[in-house]
Image (cartoon, rainbow, N blue to C red):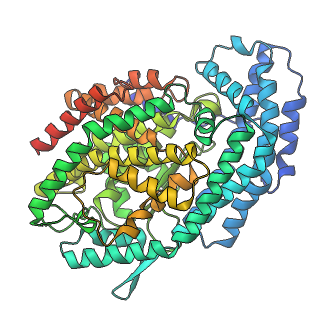
Amino acid sequence: MKISDYQIFITEKQAEFGFIPSGFVLEKWEDVLPYFQSLLDRKVDTAEETQQWLRDRSELNGVLEEDMAWRYIKMTCDTTDELAGKRFSVFVDEIQPQVSLFGNHLDKKMLQLPDIGKIEEKGLDIHLKNVQQQIEIFREENIPLQTEEQNKAKEYSNISGAMGIEWEGRELTMPQAGVLLQSTDREIRKSVYEKIGARRLKDADTLEELFSGMVELRHKMALHAGFANFRDYAFAAMHRSDYSPADCKKFHDAVEKCVVPLIGEMAVIRKQNLGLETLRPYDLAVEENGKAPLKAFESGKDLLEKGKKVFSKLNPFLGDCLEAMDKKCHFDLESRKGKAPGGYNYPLDLSGFPFIFMNASSTLRDMVTLMHEGGHAVHSIVTRLLPFNFLKHTPSEVAELASMSMELMSMDHWNIYFSDAEDLRRAKKEHLSQVIDTLPWVATIDAFQHWLYENPNHSREERTAAWLDISNRFSSGEVDYSGYEKFREIQWHKQLHLFEVPFYYIEYGMAQLGAIAVWRNFKKNPEKALGDYLAALSLGYSAGIREVYETAGVKFDFSEDYIRELMDFVRSEMESL
């Protein structure tokens, strides 16, 4: 398929729905119950009727997922909006538990449909395998626990969204405060770092107690489903068949051996270039030669307009993807008080065009985040016409390959953000440094999660000790935290994945390796690499992880030799700058 042929995903009209009536509004569980009951009661005797049943269930799932998506989007865009929060809670507390229960009944019926195994739809075999696994781990007594867990995740979002500091008479959100850590004035960096740390400490006890409750809930779910711990339960629930917990630990080991020493070398160079005797935690974001921080854009609108140009330069189809989303007002980019932390691309299967949420505050990192989430958006769009809803939602290892590859391939056109040649050079080098930094941080968070759920009855003190041990394992030792030990003890509180989507993090490390390999191919043959990338994305979940990576022209590999090979490539590219 030529890249120009992908325009069909933008211009072709979405297929009409026939099962759920136009204008359907979901206010309570009883509104959607008849459609679940219809699928459960329907008599299915032929292969054609089986296909129709699958289409109707896919449509029902799409309606529910998009309804939940908008409730989540509106709640995160303004955590102070009581109505938005209430609507989200109604879905979580009242609708989702029933959806889970009836969904299990539908899963069981699906596996018994006539000729289900004979339907020639690529990816259906993968889905049926996942459904079988989901049935095996489903326990009705876990439904209220899952509801409670989601409510605790919302509580974390509300607490984090309310955080901020006062600076020179202004109240700054945490992302806005983080920009000041790039200041060339070391006293300003120090003061801001201490204010941020003190603000996080203010809610530390609350978040620690909240997290302890989440660990307890998750462990109960695992035991109910017959697993020894939540880690093993999560791997089953996430359908991780391409790698195991033991493989994750091999990844940790490889990062420790191949990447941490490189991080140490970079830290030494940073210290020397800044003319410091001791590198402190507030010295890590400033430009290492003491230059003023790069400013990538002026506003959220400027960020988006330039982003559309970058994507268009890479290929016109990519720019059209962002343009189509913009016409639907599917962006909320700027940081503000009351907005939930983080960033995401939320697929919207019915409209076919996702929503991008982030907390931009003019930094290079914010610009890269748009490239990242834009990669996710393109992925959503090139799967929008797949026949079944379940084919559109890929494993995270594939989803993050889409986003991280876009970060690196887009660098060829970052001159749209940085017209000055020296600024452009700096931007590329800083981003490549962050690419390297990603791997030890991913290993840190993932190793911490393994410890948390292998030791579910741990105390807060034991958890803190484990965090510090793991942090030290993946740190170079070049940064002096003396006097800031309390700040470092709660450093993990800022990682929302630990609270909201447990075990969704190792994917960033695996996908970062894949993205570096995609970029290496792109440097050799841009058109072919971009074509392979889009071909891989358009598979959706019709193929397994390894097949998708192979289609993209790279390996799904996180061995020590492969990581060292890719790190050597990144190092050489940095040296060429």
**Count of number-bearing discs:** 0
Along the horizontal axis of the image, is 193 left or right of 10? left
- Residue 397: percent from left, percent from top: 46, 35
272 displayed left or right of 536: left
- 156 relative position to 472: left or right: right
Pick the front one: 29 or 482: 482
Q: Give the residue drawn at x 44%, y 49%.
A: 445
In the rendered image, the vertical position of residue 194 relative to residue 300, given as above or below: below
Identify whether 269 is placed above or below 533: below
Which one is in front, 76 or 445? 445
The residue at the point 35 percent across, 27 percent down is 531
- Height in image: 465 above or below 521? below
Q: In this rendered view, identify the residue nearer to me: 534 or 521.
A: 521
x and y, in percent, of residue 16 in the image: 69, 36
* Residue 495 position in % (x across, y down): 46, 56
Left or right: where 369 falls relative to 423: right
- Quadrant of the rendered structure where residue 359 is? bottom left
Q: Where is residue 105 shown, x and y percent of the image?
A: 82, 32
At 21% from the left and 43% from the top, the residue drawn is: 261
The N terminus - image quarter: top left
